[in-house]
Image: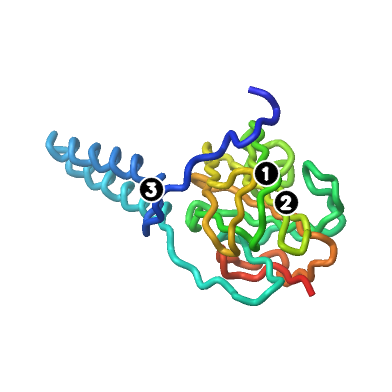
């Protein structure tokens, strides 16, 4: 596989349900295993499988969010915890100086990702890589990832990167080059623990710091005056 390829993480957007449809194959498979264990008179294993199916359904939950309507806001693209805010960082694939905000998603967070602001996808770049723990700095550089270079209505450029973690093995992105998404609109997910980095132009006023818990589509990361 080449180091970079266009839209390798792309999948057509499915119908949006309270549980993301990407989780259905896992839920069904584990439930079938639970039923099989029950028919073989293995109640403890059946109960464990049923509990695992419930957790998978919880992991793939896809709740509605109250998206801020104010102009110039940039909302969190992921649920989780801010682990880094760093100014003067060159954005990947563009080299433009930016403020980098990194959000770590544990297995207990909602993993459906949302657009940070109304924007058009100018480039979509998937890169295969390693699977270091997503909270480590080297994950941004070495892990499997999918980058979206965005341009908002004012011509500002933002870069958003979905990054797989040590458990995650699949990045899903519904956005293709040329697509336009609205603030807070669902655009993909990462399975089973991961990270999302967003690079904002220097004139964005950052409103979060390390340790801040975020809700995708709701928490304001920054504003453009």
Q: Residue 71: x, y in percent?
A: 68, 74
State the colouring used for the structure image: rainbow
What residue does disc 2 label?
159
Query: From this viewpoint, which residue is outermost toward the top?
Result: 1
Q: Is residue 203 left or right of residue 145?
A: right
Q: Quadrant of the C terminus?
A: bottom right
Q: Residues within 10 Å of mark 1 (few under 14, many from 20)?
A: many
Q: Residues within 10 Å of mark 3 (few under 14, many from 20)?
A: some
- In contact (CB < 8 Å): disc 1 and disc 2: yes
- In contact (CB < 8 Å): disc 3 and disc 2: no
Q: Residue 99, which numbered label? A: none
Q: Residue 144: x, y in percent?
A: 63, 36
Looking at the image, which residue is at 71% across and 48% down?
A: 149
Looking at the image, which residue is at 49% across and 46% down?
A: 192
What residue does disc 1 label?
147
Instruction: Kindly tell me whether residue 129 is visible in this rendering.
Output: no
Looking at the image, which residue is at 32% across and 52% down?
A: 54
Q: Residue 197: x, y in percent?
A: 69, 52
Quarter of the view holding residue 203: bottom right
Task: Tell me if residue 215 comes above or below residue 112 in the rendering.
Answer: below
Disc 3 is placed on an element classified as helix
Q: Is residue 41 left or right of residue 85?
A: left
First-in-chain label (3 vs 2):
3
Q: CA distance from mark 1 to mark 2?
A: 7 Å
Q: Residue 98: x, y in percent?
A: 82, 56
Disc 2 is placed on an element classified as strand
Q: Quadrant of the N terminus?
A: top right
What residue does disc 3 label?
21
- Report the label total: 3
- Residue in front for this viewpoint, 182 or 64: 182
């Amino acid at each position: 596989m080449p180091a970079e390829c266009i839209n390798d993480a792309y999948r057509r957007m499915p119908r949006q349900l309270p549980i993301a449809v990407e989780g259905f194959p896992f839920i069904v498979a584990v439930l079938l295993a639970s039923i099989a264990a029950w028919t073989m008179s293995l109640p403890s294993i059946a109960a464990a499988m049923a509990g695992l199916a419930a957790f998978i359904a919880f992991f793939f939950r896809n709740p509605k969010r109250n998206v801020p309507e104010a102009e110039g806001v940039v909302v969190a693209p992921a649920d989780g915890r801010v682990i880094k805010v760093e100014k003067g960082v060159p954005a990947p694939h563009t080299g433009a100086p930016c403020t980098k905000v990194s959000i770590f998603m544990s297995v207990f967070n909602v993993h459906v990702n949302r657009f940070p602001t109304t924007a058009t996808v100018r480039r979509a770049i998937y890169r295969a890589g390693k699977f270091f723990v997503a909270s480590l700095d080297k994950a941004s550089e070495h892990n499997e990832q999918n980058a979206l270079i965005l341009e908002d209505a004012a011509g500002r450029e933002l870069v958003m990167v979905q990054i797989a973690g040590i458990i995650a093995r699949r990045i899903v992105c519904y956005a293709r080059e040329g697509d336009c998404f609205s603030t807070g609109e669902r655009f993909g997910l990462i399975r089973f623990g991961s990270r999302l980095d967003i690079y904002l132009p220097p004139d964005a006023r950052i409103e979060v710091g390390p340790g801040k818990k975020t809700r995708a589509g709701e928490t304001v990361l920054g504003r453009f005056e």
